[in-house]
Every structure is written in C-alpha cells, then in structure tokens.
Amino acid sequence: MTTPNDVLKLKGPTKDFLCPVSANVWGIEFLEYKIRDMDSKNVLFHVKKDKSVVASVPTEEDAVRLIRYDFGESFLKLRNIGTSLTFSVGPQEIKGFRMIERHYFRNKLLKSFDFNFGFCIPGSTNSWEVIYDLPVLSKKEEQEMIDHPYETRSDSFYFVNDRLIMHNKAEYAYSRK
C-alpha cells in the first residue's frame, strides 16, 4: 500500500499509476477545475464536467488520469496561481482527505505541495481553493523547460486516512505563442 510518506520520498515523476481507478471507493468525482493567475486574475485553464454526459468506464483507464497542458512561455514568469476544484462525494463520509502534489522537471523536484481537506459530508459537493507560490527559476531552467515540452510533469496523489485512493498525472509545455 502506497502511503503519504512514500510519495513524499519520490525522487522523480512516477512511470505508472500507483493505484487503480477502482481504489476510489468513496465515489469522489471531479466536477470543475480552474487555474488562474492570481496577480492579473486571468483564467489560464477551465474545464467543467458536462452533467448531461453519463460516465462510462473507459477501456484505457489511464487516459482519463493524465492531462497535458500547454500554458505558453509567459506562464514561467508567474509568481502565484490559484486553482479551484469542485468535487462531489459518494454516499460515505470522508475523513482525512489529503492531496499531495509533486512537480518535476525531468527528475528534479521543483515544488511539493501537501494539502489537507479534512472531512467531507456524504453526498456533498465541495470546493477546494488553493493558492500556489510558484518556484523561482533561473533563465537557464526556464529555457530548458521551453525547449523540452512535456518533460515538466506532476503527480497528484489523493488519500483518505492515509490510503491512496486516486493518482492523476499532468505533463506541461511552455511553447512560444
């Protein structure tokens, strides 16, 4: 069983997912996600689940757990971003809901975040607002990240009572636009 301490010791992004989709026995479902620049308030990314679409289990379950972003090179100059996540909970209460997110360029850890949501009421819809201080990068690091799209990666691990129930991945490009 993968624990929070295990993921906090990782030296690079994971090659595989550390739990199956079926580990989410609490029925947590992500409904909306937004990323914005906290200084300008510009929305950088926004996705909302279409409630009219009935969910189905994809043949390739890993495809739904990996997202690729291309924010453009100006993203690397930002100092603070905010994310808003709206999610629903199944019929069981959730105690000790925690997210650990680790960002890497190649195998170098850029930033690690550890958030505790705590308790979720059964059948509820919840919002989770997080403000991130982005790492300060050297000009050389910025250029390497621009020159090597999708080699900047993150792993997001979701735990309930220190039990891994969800693992999502992201890959990032910072293309010249």
Image (tube, rainbow, N blue to C red):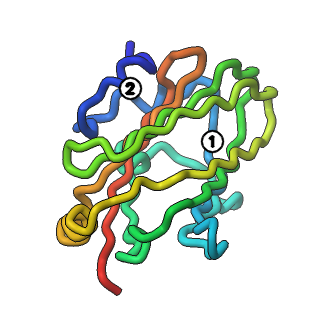
SS state under label 2:
helix
- In the image, taking residue 125 as reference, residue 50 lies left or right, namely left
Q: Which mark is residue 8?
A: 2
What kind of residue is marked 1?
A: Glu
Q: Looking at the image, which is closer to me, 68 or 146?
A: 146
- Residue 98 on image: x %, y %: 58, 28
- In the image, residue 22 sits, relative to residue 139, either above or below, namely above
Decide: few, some or many residues near mark 2? Use Cα within 10 Å; few <14, some 14-19, many ≥20.
some
Circles 2 and 1, Cβ within 8 Å, touching? The answer is no
The numbered mark at residue 29 is 1
On screen, residue 109 above or below 95: below
> Picture coordinates of residue 151 (x, y %)?
23, 57
In the rendered image, which quarter is residue 160 located in?
top right
Query: Quick check: 61 left or right of 24?
Result: left
Q: Position of residue 45 (x, y in %)?
A: 54, 68
| Residue beneath the point at 42% across and 70% down | 77
Which corner quadrant holds the N terminus? Answer: top left
